Amino acid sequence: MSLSKAANTVHLTQSALTQGIKKLENELNQVLFIRTHSGMTPTPSGIFFLNRVERAFEYLDEFSRVIFNNKHKQDAFNRSVTSKQLVALIHLVQMKNYTAAANKLNLSQPTLHRSIKDLEQLCKKDLAVRSPVGIEPTWTANLLNRFAKLFFSELRQGIYEMREFNGQMDGALKVGSLPLARSAIVPLSIIALNNEFPDAQLSIIDGPYQEQLANLLHGEIDIIVGALRIPAQHNDIEQIPLFKDQLCVVVNAQHPLASRQTISTKELQQLDWVAPNKSTPAWQVFSNIFVSRGLPPPSHVIECSSQVAARGILLNSSRAALLPAKQVEIEVQTGILAICPMTLPDTDRSIGLAIRKDWQPTQMQSRFLTIIKNNTRML
């Protein structure tokens, strides 16, 4: 496309567009276009970055398609919305308070109010309503918050790719780690990745599954590693199985069950348990041990999603827990906990990765996927 046509399309002067492209090239340290008498042709790095920009704007397109049933209104929103407005909304949704959001952005409260009001005009919808505890984002605000975060996430991915073009492998990877993956799978894979890319910004993020899923859907983490949810809990999520993990009965080393070779389901049902949280795949496995045999799940249960707390309960009581052997490997080796020798049928869980279906990893992020797949093949 010629520079004059491009300038007309985005309603800028040729000089303003030229300055904007030059500034972007300087910031990315990349030549994005080759200038000729017949027009401008993107360079290989320009094509990569253009892909990221187009993908970023597809998220805003998706939002406007949901909100407006009129193509003219969709185009008007996409053309008029600004990054400052989106940043203002993201912080208001996070803080649920105009004063706190304005302080976080180093803005005056009237300036933040104005940005949100302008955005409401573009959306033709209210974005925030007052509540007894502050500001409550509307459904439209929460939807735009998600797509705005994905918009900025995609642009960051583009910047990381441009730095990879320059040989600077210092991009970011954020891995959400569920209980089983925390002790070995994720740490060992992250260490291996760091050995190859010592300048990479690597983060392991802990937390319950629903919180991690929300972060994944908002582009705030890249991958979740752990027990897969069957079926996947959101249409935008792809799950990649890595291996099957069998759960075992774990008790205090002095527990009578520690050396028992066999035990009936009825005896298991009568035990006092530290049970998985009901929202987890491990609970489904635990419950199915009894339900599939016509028995109700045990009633003397302490629900616990914390590995540290479960360990403390087992060490100081006669309760039993259903846990992966690897999760208590150190405690078993030191002789303070024991894995009961009996085998429980139908206690397999699928362990793997959850990613967004449309996620396009950078070179460094792709390498992590290869590393963790190779590491888990040896399990």
Image (cartoon, rainbow, N blue to C red):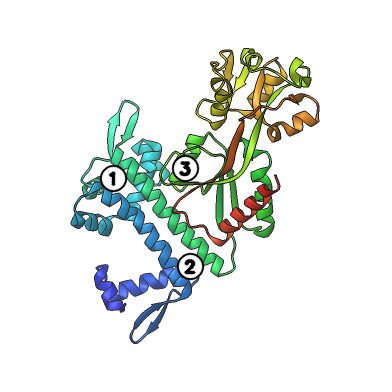
Q: Which residue is mark 2?
A: 28
At horizontal 30% and vertical 47% (from top left) the residue drawn is 111
Q: Classify 22 as above or below 239.
A: below
Total labels drawn: 3
SS of the residue at dot 1?
Answer: helix
Q: Measure how far apart labels 3 and 2 are at the Cα level.
A: 27 Å
What amino acid is at disc 3? Answer: Asn
Relative to residue 187, is residue 125 drawn left or right? Answer: left
The mark nearer the N terminus, 3 or 1, is 1
Q: Which residue is mark 1?
A: 116
186 or 43: nearer the viewer: 186
What amino acid is at disc 2?
Leu
Instruction: Describe the element under mark 3 as helix, strand or loop.
Output: helix
For disc 1, the neighbor class at 10 Å (few under 14, some 14 to 19, many from 20) is: many
Q: Does residue 86 lie above or below 182 as drawn?
A: below
**Residue 13 in sight here:** no
Instruction: Pick out the residue farthest to the front.
Output: 293
Element type where label 2 sits in the image: helix
Residue at (33%, 43%) from the top-left corner? 143
Judge the density around disc 2: few (<14), some (14-19), many (≥20) Cα neighbours within 10 Å: some
Instruction: Name the residue beneath numbered marker 3.
Output: 215
Amino acid on which disc 1 is placed: Ile
> Counting other residues with Cα less than 10 Å from the Cα at mark 3, is it few (<14), some (14-19), or many (20 or more)?
some
Can residue 157 be seen in this snapshot? Answer: yes
Which residue sits at x=24%, y=40%?
126
- Mark 3 or mark 2, whichever is nearer to me: 3
Decide which of 80, 184 is in the foreground and name it. Answer: 184
User: Could you say which disc has been placed on residue 285 in the image?
Assistant: none
Q: Position of residue 185 (x, y in %)?
A: 66, 44
Of callouts 2 and 1, the N-terminal one: 2
The quarter of the image holding the C terminus is top right
Q: Quadrant of residue 1?
A: bottom left
